[in-house]
Structures are given as C-alpha cells and as structure tokens.
Amino acid sequence: MALLGVNIDHVATIRQARRASEPDPVQAAVLAELGGADSITIHLREDRRHIQDRDVRILRETVRLRLNLEMAVSDEITRIALQTLPEQATLVPERREEVTTEGGLDVITHAQRISQCAAQLTGAGILVSLFIDPDVEQVRKTVELNIPAVELHTGAWAEARTPAARAAELDRLREAGLYAVSQGLILNMGHGLTYDNVRPVARLHGVHELNIGHSIISRAVLVGLERAVREMKQLVAGPTL
C-alpha cells in the first residue's frame, strides 16, 4: 500500500497572496496528519514565493510526521536544510519563471553538483531523493551516485488526454519504477496527481509514497483539509498491480 505525502505549499501560496499571517501551513500540517497523511512535504523555493524560512523552522519543530523538504541544488537552501535537518530532502529543478516544477532533474548533465549537494545532506543524516522524469537512464545515473531514493515525475501522466497516451505514460512510470525498485531504490511518485487520476499510479508495483499537493488543497477549500486528505488517502490505499 502506497503512503501519502501531503504537500502544503499552496496553503502558503494563499497566505502570501496577501502577505498575511493566515492560513498558516503549520496548522495545515496538523490537519493533514489528522486526515491520515504519512508525511508532510514543503518546497522552500529560492524566490520564497510560498513557503518561508520561518515555516521550515517551525514545521521542523512541530511536525510529528516525516518532513520532506523539496529544494533546488543551491548552496543557500542546502545550508538551511543542514540547519533544520528534515528527515528527507528531495532535490528538484527550479526556474524562477515557472508556475510549478515543470520537469525532472537532469541527473546525467548535473551529476557533479547533485552528488556534492547529496553528500552534504547525507552526511547530516538526511535521506536524499531525486525528482526525475520516468526515464531508466536517469534512474541508472541516480544509482551510480549512490542516492537512495527517487520521485518519478507524473506530470505527463496527469496531462495525457487520450487512452493511448495515458497507457503509454503509465507504461513509462511502470518501467522506470520497476527498474528503480530492482536497484534497491525507494520509489516515490508525484506531480499533477488528482482524485481522478491517482489510483492507477498508486497501484503500480513498488510505489512507496505519492506526494500530492494542489489537488488536495483545492478540495480542502470546499470540504476542509482533514476530509480532503482522508479522501485522498482512501484512494491511494489499495493493492498494487
């Protein structure tokens, strides 16, 4: 049964729209836990468009679940990670002009920088994961760098509109995921997953955890965060294929 990581970035997005003090992502983390979340994910972006340094510090002190910090391969953000010590750091690509993370890390091209950053985090006892496209060659390079976990980018699956395209994207996730598991990696997946499209991904063999944010927060606006998390948790739970 796949675990559910809840990304609470967009709670902070709403707050930052008014530069106000609410809604507070710290309170959101508590409600997500009550709803059945297995971990909390936050992305401290270099431009601080949603999650702030204060959020990272307080969440580290208060969250009882595993805290997953998404971060660019950046000296500044690495220093913050080493100071706050989340249980997990997921290295992601980051561009200032993008609305959300648009693709996976190119591990092959940026292997040296990724390896140096990962070594610092690992030395501090932080589990390192790489957010990559569902590509066997990217997984293979991750293995070569001795990084223990990957999160496969599910955006292409989420955006596929025809049965043939959906089947092709699910096959890509399955192939890369099976290879990752065969190499001993922890296999996570995420990006663009919703209440409508999550079940086939959740049932792929070897998936450890799904990280979902926008869809849960969107539903929470209508039904409340605890219920929104609980409903997603029910969809994620189930036998693998």
Image: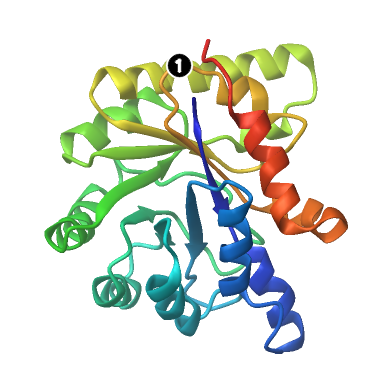
**Residue farthest to the left, as pictured:** 123
Q: Can residue 21 be seen in this view?
A: yes
Classify mark 1: helix, strand or loop.
Answer: loop
**Residue farthest to the right, as pictured:** 222
Q: Mark 1 packing: few (<14 Cα in 10 Å), some, or many (20+)?
A: some
The part of the image, by quadrant, that contains residue 145 is: top left
Q: Position of residue 123 (x, y in %)?
A: 12, 60
What amino acid type is highlighted by mark number 1? His
Q: Is residue 215 visible?
A: no
Residue at 68% x, 72% y is 13
Q: How many labels does the image show?
A: 1
The residue where tag 1 is placed is 205
Residue at 84% x, 54% y is 223
46 to 228, vertically: above or below: below
Lateral position of residue 85 relative to residue 94, left or right: left
Q: Where is residue 177 in the image (x, y as percent from the top left)?
A: 41, 22
Residue at 72% x, 57% y is 225
Query: Toward the viewer: 153 or 35?
Result: 35
28 to 87, vertically: above or below: below
Q: Position of residue 12 (x, y in %)?
A: 64, 73
166 to 71, vertically: above or below: above
The part of the image, by quadrant, that contains residue 92 is: bottom left
